[in-house]
Image (cartoon, rainbow, N blue to C red):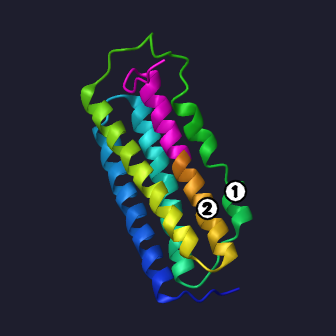
Amino acid sequence: MPSILNQKERMLLQDQQHHEQLCIQKYTKYSNEAQDPQLKQLFQTHASHEQHHFDTISQILSGQVPNLNQQQGQGQQSQSSQIYNTGITQNQNTSFNQNDASLANDMLTTEKYISGTYDTTIFEIRDTNIRQVLNHIQKEEQKHGEDLYKYMQSHGMYNTPS
């Protein structure tokens, strides 16, 4: 069923689409710059997810409400969840490439920001089905952040007090 967006909804979704485009560009650029093959793969996988988010928002902006069951059935996160899980504990690997750490930190900061902007957009959308789709995307953004955090922590790049 087509959905009609008001001006504010359209503006917020265009902002989210711009954020997704920025993520695609950064993840793609950073996958080329990263030294660690694991981090390269993580960036490539997340770039693919961000492209899917961009395409989903494009659908919404064109008046179509994507099917949430298709979104959930794709199993996009299973790949990235295994990328950082190398069995290396923080104490076992404390030397790392500083550039890789900077790239991962920048993407973690970006994911935190974008997840927060989805909060505002979700609250401003009237259509329940669109809200559910955006909530699903936001959860994937949070999962990206978790993947980055776990990668960084397992490679000694992100230390938290005990």
| Amino acid type assigned to the residue bearing label 2 in the image | Asn
Residue interval drawn in magenta: 143-162
Give the image location of residue 88, x and y in percent: 50, 16
**Residue drawn at point x = 59 percent, y = 89 percent:** 4
Give the image location of residue 39, x and y in percent: 41, 34
- Image: 105 above or below 119: above
- Image: 109 above or below 17: above
In the image, 113: left or right of 56?
left
Q: Residues within 10 Å of mark 2 (few under 14, many from 20)?
A: some
What SS does tag 1 mark? helix
| Amino acid type assigned to the residue bearing label 1 in the image | Gln
Magenta span includes 48: no
Residue holding disc 2: 135
**Residue drawn at point x = 43 percent, y = 69 percent:** 17
Give the image location of residue 29, x and y in percent: 30, 48
Q: Quadrant of residue 100?
A: top left
What SS does tag 2 mark? helix
Residue holding disc 1: 72
The image's mark for residue 115 is none
**Residue drawn at point x = 63 percent, y = 59 percent:** 136
Q: Number of numbered discs present?
A: 2
Of label 2 and label 1, which has the lower sequence position? Answer: 1
In the image, 70: left or right of 83?
right
Q: Main secondary structure of the magenta part?
A: helix
**Quadrant in which the N terminus appears:** bottom right
